[in-house]
Amino acid sequence: MTSSTVFTSIISEYSSAFPNIEIEIQNHQESVDLKRQGIDLQVLPCAVNISDDSYIQFSLLSYSSHFVASKQYVASHPPITLENLGDQRVLTNRYNADLLDYGINISMQSDDLNLLRYMAINGQGIAFIPELHSKPFIESGDLVEVLSDIDYPDQHLTLLYPSAMFLPKKVRVLKDLFKQKFG
């Protein structure tokens, strides 16, 4: 998430609008105790269990994932089917890995979606990644979708914060920017 262009543009816009506010960005892949750790906001995939049910949760973005590979990878391997997917080099993140229950041998798991996409573009396997991260590269011809007839459940990113009642203005503005960009 922190390496996405949308996240980068949100932080850049916020920083430009409020140059005197100190910003600390931490990359946590699991739910944290926002109050105890003094963290204002957290963005997490829906697959993560939230550590405190009292947190305000707002769904920012619904997304689907799919399999993509380079044309070279597809051309140099037998036709890719669900039956032989286990023989392929599959690349995904830990949240998407839970969606793959076909006895698929996952060659690489990384929370860095840019790395997974880069590896797929360079013919190092089939990446199972969110469509948001692959769409421009499919349009440019760097990637092709494989197994396009398989539908996987949509997932979503959730914005968390401890309390709406005592939310400082600087955090409320950032929260609203997230909602605006993802809404």
Image (tube, rainbow, N blue to C red):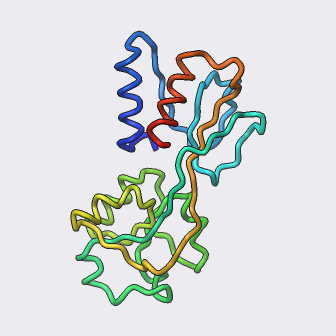
Residue 91, placed above or below residue 179? below
Based on the displayed image, in which of its 4 quarters is residue 68 positioned?
bottom left
Q: Choose top left, top right, bottom left or bottom right for residue 22.
A: top left
Front in this rendered view, residue 178 or 28:
178
What's the residue at 45%, 68% (across, down)?
Answer: 66
Question: Is the residue 20 above or below the residue 160 in the image?
Answer: above
**Residue 27 on image: x %, y %:** 51, 37
Residue sitting farthest toward the top: 20
The relative height of residue 137 versus residue 173 in the rendered view (above or below) is: below
Of residues 78 and 45, the one nearer the viewer is 45
Residue 102 location, x and y as percent? 58, 80
Q: Kindly identify the residue that appears in the image at 44 percent across and 83 percent down.
A: 87
- Left or right, 163 with respect to 71, comes to right
The number of numbered badges drawn on the structure is: 0
Q: Quadrant of residue 80?
A: bottom left
Which residue is found at the position 58% from the left and 30% from the top?
41
Q: Position of residue 181 (x, y in %)?
A: 44, 38
